Image (cartoon, grey):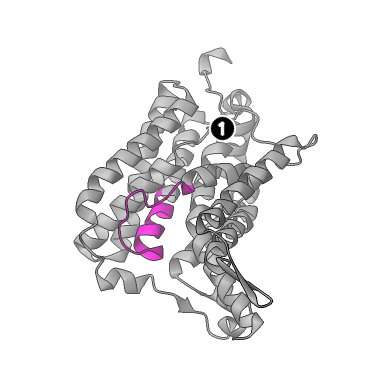
Amino acid sequence: MTFLTSLGLFLQVAVQTGTHILFGILGGILFEKAGNTNLGTEGMMLLGAAAGYLTGITTGNPAAAIIASGLAGSMGALIYAFITVNLQGNQVVTGLVLTIFGTGVSSYLGKTLAATPLPSSVINAFAPCSVPFFSDIPVIGPMIFNQSPYVYMSVILAVMIHLYYKYTRWGLNVRAIGENPAAADLSGINVSLYKYTHILSGGFICGLGGAYLSLVFVPRWQENITAGAGWIAVALVIFCGWHPLKAIAASWAFGALKGLSFKCQNLTIGSSTLTIPPQLLDMMPYLATIAVLAAFSSRKKNKNPPPASLGKNYFREER
């Protein structure tokens, strides 16, 4: 196997490993651009993973499994939206409760899911498919153009969200809400409606990210299948500066670091072999995330500041 072939395969796995993180980041961006802190990503991803797998084994229909996973994530987001938008509850605490809720529900459903495999109709629908001609390009071909349709969907979704925020009136309105909801309200923008719409949409996307793990990446049910991916997504939302296109690079970089745990366990140096504990390699993506966030937070001038009203509840009566 040539070096370029080996590199292409490694990057292909990196993209696959980071796809669920990308969904989580995109869902978090929709939350936070509307001014709501999102710490419930892990819970919504677990809800989506459980609902998607349950629907997949029940119906054998891949489209139904995707829709069910997104709706499960949106249901979790609906709880969050009602508490934080209508009841003006603390956003951080509500997000943490949502994560606990999603973990509990998925664990309960998982008692029956683990013993039942996915039907072949679902597995085959999400199998990797190559794009003619482009998949033959060295390195880039296997990395991008020989992936599951689910991976393509994540990239298309990131591009669509970027265009939405940059070029549409609705995207500009929600950005205004994230910066100054009172001013947006005075301009005739329905703040509560926009918040609900984007919180539910963000939950839908987080649910899709969880379903990617249970339907595509694994594909079988495992207890706590996300393994903290939702928390990594929360951190990478900050790292990518709330920018959907940068989210693609951030999630794939995390996937590449995660892939090192498979590639670097046994390193040959001269005539000797160095064995690195797999636990240490598994720590690397998380340590890198902490280091990047520390460096990001220590910068005196931030070119990508968070939305000004992020984490602040909006009381219409106090305008």
Q: Which residue is mark 1?
A: 35
- The residue at the point 50 percent across, 42 percent down is 231
Residue 210 within the magenta-colored segment of the rendering: yes
Indicate the quadrant containing the C terminus: top left, top right, bottom left or bottom right. top right
Horizontal and vertical percent position of residue 49:
34, 52
Left or right: where does residue 167 sit relative to residue 78?
right
| Magenta residues, start to end | 207-229
- The residue at the point 24 percent across, 57 percent down is 114
Horizontal and vertical percent position of residue 199:
46, 38
Horizontal and vertical percent position of residue 48:
35, 50
In this view of the protein, which residue sits in the foreground, 225 or 203?
Answer: 225
Q: Quadrant of residue 158?
A: bottom right
Left or right: where does residue 313 sit relative to residue 99?
right
Horizontal and vertical percent position of residue 263:
56, 69
- The answer to whether one can see residue 68 in this image is no
Residue 117 within the magenta-colored segment of the rendering: no
Looking at this rendering, what residue extends furthest in the right direction? Answer: 300
In this view of the protein, which residue sits in the foreground, 267 or 247?
Answer: 267
- The residue at the point 49 percent across, 34 percent down is 195
Vertical side of 194 occupied by 118: above or below = below
Looking at numbered disc 1 in the image, what kind of residue is underneath it?
Gly
Vertical side of 173 occupied by 160: above or below = below
Looking at this rendering, what residue extends furthest in the top direction? Answer: 318
Label 1 sits on a secondary structure element that is loop
- The answer to whether one can see residue 77 in this image is yes
Indicate the quadrant containing the N terminus: top left, top right, bottom left or bottom right. bottom right
Q: Quadrant of residue 181?
A: top right
- The residue at the point 56 percent across, 81 percent down is 135
In this view of the protein, which residue sits in the foreground, 205 or 47?
Answer: 47
Left or right: where does residue 76 sit relative to residue 241?
left
Mark 1 neighbour class, 10 Å CA radius: few under 14, some 14 to 19, many 20 or more: many
